[in-house]
Amino acid sequence: MHDTTAWNGYADWTLELAGLNRGSSKDATMWEPICLRILTAKGAPAMGADCDAFFKQAASIGREGGFIVPPMERQFHYTLSAPKEAVEIIAYRRLDRRAVFTGDHGAKGADTGLRFEVLATGAVIRDDTLPTLEKVNARDPFLPPKLVFGIIDDGIGVLHGRSRRNATASRIEKVLWLAAHPGSASVQTLAELNDELSRPIQRSEQDAYKELADAAYAPRTRHSLGRAQTHGAHMLDLAIGASDSSDPLSRVPILGVQVAPESFDDTSGTRLNFDILIGLRWMILETALLAGRGTPVDLVVNISLGYTAGPKNGRSFIEQAIARLIELAEMALHVNVYVLVPYGNAYADNVIARTNIRGGEAETFNLRVQPDDRTPSFLEMRLTDQSPEQDPGLIEVTIAAPRGGMQQSVFTLPAGQYADLNDDAGRLVGRLYHIPARTLFAGQVEPAYLMLALAPTVTSRSDADLTCPSGQWQITLRNCAEQAMDLTAQVQRDDDPSGRNTGARQARLEGEETRVWDALGRDFEGVDEGANRVTRRGTNSALSTIAHSRVHSVGGALVRRDPAVPAHMTVEAAEYYGAEGADWSGDAPDLSAISEVERGAPGVTAAGLTSAGNARLSGSSTACATAARDLVNRLLTEPPLPDMPHPAADSRLGGRTILDTPAIRRRP
């Protein structure tokens, strides 16, 4: 067993797989994002002007010293700070200086002069892709907007005709490119976009996107801007695309955040949380300055991204951070932030199990890890009663590898410790973490949980890279307490995102209850919900339970028209993927929207990356973007999209279903 201060097990295991944080020269080229709370010399949360000394000291350390506070974060503090509010910012510490910049006097006795508490850490970033995040400078609009639309996604169609005011004028005010290399500007302005649109017509949009990508990303970066269809272009069109100036949406300014390609590729969410948080903070600043500080303005943000495993009770770090940002933006800047997130697509993936273990007894879960998986697999084990006094440390974990590849390992882990899993040859194949509970914002506690991290099952790099056996892993959980424990096992998302080939293959839970007849698919891949083990309930996204009234989770729906009577429609959940809520995971989405129009061909058709192309994508991401369009219409007091209310909130469809949107292209 090992003590760890890297309480983010996902990020820690990523470091291990990359051979980092071992004192090698590679550590000096990698930076770790951290969300921190500034403290006074006495250890109390710093407020207002108490933070001046911190920012001054951080500036004196800078990149050379291994600790960076981006100018945007300093601006964010002085723009949004309230006299009696603690101050949380995002900073970066170089990996080889991690033990020095801990927030106290330094593990090696070096007093850095910086007092802070680390709230969250993220996956490390290469030095050549570290975001600069310069101070926000908004232009003076001719008419300050009453509403701004924001999108955080990959492959946003910044040059698409449906995001323009006219042929040579864009509606996109600014785009923040995360992971842009130091030789390029990380923020693209309206003037620069208009200049792109005004260049000679002989240059195609594909050529323009190639030039943008070459300028933004380091060589050999895998990105989506060379493809005919991208996730972000499709979502932007569904949410805010307009054909001409007669559409009220054509007058809504747009802010875009292009997430780092690595963040989009990694569907476990290891890298995504900080991209979302940085993007949302940037959008709030931009919106406030665009409208005029203190002028009430609405900001609708579509985040059609997500992952599966998590507490799903509004108390994860990213959920609390988003809810807190919404409150701060309204209180300090009169920016009313609305966020839309998809409910998830994991309904039939067999990634959730739930069981009740009586005191002294044990239950075994079978985790099928796929062959040829080039990405790590993760399994979270959480008590459904996630109150602070509940202790996963009272669970004894026994792990058996497929085909007897290692001796059974038995662990009872205290909070904040991890244990390595080694095969019979002594090679590291995985790690079991006990992630401790942490008090984050306003006394809210992020619950403790156990997490199993496994290496990829194959690698193409070198024999020294970590791999683990594919096949059925057996995880036995014994309840060492006297009272019964109700708990869930959640396999983290691990698949290829839209339009990518990352080599990811989704691990899944299996057992006798996962081999029953499925009348819909006409196969034996159904789930017996009465078996109290593997279940399709609770498959909603880990981002779908943010505890704020202006955050809306959106499920996917199959909406079919009757050819004989087009006005008549049938509505049901998107059968193979539309996630289902549970009593421990938020019960149901807030609403749903059309994401399928027929059973034969999946998805809905909307914009491709270029103005001449179309693309067909499915999933609750598309439903989320359609719901964003409906919300924008409502805030502009325009007619809302047609919908159908449900008498009781459906566990997959929510309280109502949006039936159609003009952004969907239909066959004649």
Image: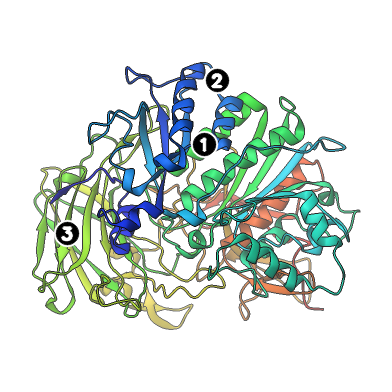
Residue at 58% over, 46% down:
279
Gap in Å between the C-alphas at discs 2 and 3?
A: 44 Å
Identify residue type, mark 1: Ala
The kind of secondary structure element at disc 3 is strand
Query: In the image, what residue type sits under mark 2?
Result: Ala
| Residue at figure coordinates x 82%, y 45% from the top left | 638
- Is the C-beta separation of discs 2 and 1 under 8 Å? no
**Viewer-closest of 634 and 64:** 64
Q: Are marks 2 and 3 in contact (CB under 8 Å)?
A: no
Q: Position of residue 9 (x, y in %)?
A: 30, 52
- Left or right, 635 with respect to 97, comes to right
Residue 662 appears left or right of 84: right
Q: Which residue is mark 2?
A: 82
Residue ranking furthest to the front: 64
Q: Secondary structure at mark 2?
A: loop
Task: Look at discs 2 and 1 and give the one toward the viewer.
Answer: 2
Question: In which quadrant of the rendered image does the C terminus lie?
Answer: bottom right
Going by the picture, which residue comes out furthest to the right?
246
Query: Viewed as shown, does residue 181 lie left or right of 370?
Result: right
Marks 1 and 3 in Cβ contact (< 8 Å): no
Query: In the image, what residue type sits under mark 3?
Result: Asp
Question: Residue 420, labelled with which disc?
Answer: 3
Q: Earlier in the sequence, mark 2 or mark 1?
A: 2
Mark 2–mark 1 Cα distance, whole angstroms, equals 16 Å
Which residue position holds label 1? 323
